[in-house]
Amino acid sequence: MFGIGRDKKDKNLPVKLDRGPLGSTALGLAERIMQVGIDGKGSFHSAEQIAAKALQESKGDREKAVKEIISDTRRLAAANGFVTGLGGFVTMAVALPANVAGFYLISTRMVAAIAKVRGYDLRDPALRSAILLTLVGADADDILNKAGVVSTGRLANLATQQLPPPVMMVVNKAVGFRLIGQVGEKATTRLGKAIPFAGGFVGAGIDSWMLHKVADNARNQFPAR
């Protein structure tokens, strides 16, 4: 399903991602999102706890639990977007990074909780990278290709391969770069936040819609085992 590319001279390989301070920042961001988003921290519950709660409330019905996880997370995403959009342009410089961080943390936890409910081991490093890749949607294939990993199936299949740690590091770092880049993209799409308070509704709508896309992708990438 996945294989390591043999052509070491391929110019598309992301050699530059392994060097420089920005590369360290991107990798650090990716690792932090995986650590907190999956394992939780303080009052931010882990994906395993979220999955267990959803299964308990659904009386063991796994697909009902998945729907509950998505529904709860969409409400959180909408609330996150609303609160960080209240101040308009006056507070956007501070609120936007906070919004992006909050969005990706709850999205990561949602995807991980879905994977847990459907029978995946959240301790598997490759699976954790697959969860991270879910956040970038269609860009995931491009990232894998540039890392020398040929994808012919779902992201969950990464967990069945014996990919070398350096390859997974490059993948995680590339996702980190994409997420950093999306801060600027979010700023462009959130120009409606120029009006205080009204911008909160714009932010809530955008984050809820984006979360819905991530959820649909997660459902497809992590089928029940």
Image (cartoon, rainbow, N blue to C red):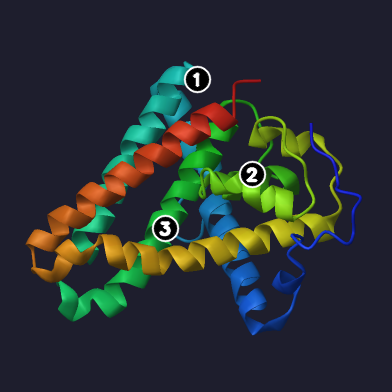
Q: Residues within 10 Å of mark 1 (few under 14, many from 20)?
A: many
Q: Residue at x 73, y 73 (%)?
A: 16
Q: Residues within 10 Å of mark 2 (few under 14, many from 20)?
A: some
Up-down relation of residue 29 to residue 225 (above or below): below
Q: Quadrant of the C terminus?
A: top right
Q: Residue at x 35, y 69 (%)?
A: 98
Q: Position of residue 29 (x, y in %)?
A: 57, 68
The mark lying in front, picked from 3 and 2, is 2
Q: Nearer the viewer, residue 39 or 139?
A: 139
Please tell me whether mark 2 sits on a helix, a strand or a loop: helix
Q: Earlier in the sequence, mark 2 or mark 1?
A: 1
Up-down relation of residue 17 to residue 179 (above or below): below
**Residue type pointed to by label 2:** Asp
Asked if residue 66 can be seen in this view, the reply is yes
Up-down relation of residue 171 to residue 68 (above or below): below
Please tell me whether mark 3 sits on a helix, a strand or a loop: loop
Q: Position of residue 155 (x, y in %)?
A: 65, 37
Up-down relation of residue 162 to residue 86 (above or below): above
Q: Earlier in the sequence, mark 3 or mark 1?
A: 3
Q: Residue at x 58, y 64 (%)?
A: 176
User: Which quadrant of the figure has residue 43?
Assistant: bottom left
Question: Where does label 1 land, which residue?
Answer: 62
Q: Position of residue 45 (x, y in %)?
A: 46, 50
Question: Where does label 2 land, which residue?
Answer: 141
Question: Where does label 3 land, which residue?
Answer: 43
Residue 126, label in figure: none
Asked if residue 86 can be seen in this view, the reply is no
Q: Residues within 10 Å of mark 3 (few under 14, many from 20)?
A: few
> As drawn, is 65 to the left or to the right of 46?
left
**Residue type pointed to by label 3:** Ser
**Residue type pointed to by label 1:** Arg
Please tell me whether mark 1 sits on a helix, a strand or a loop: helix
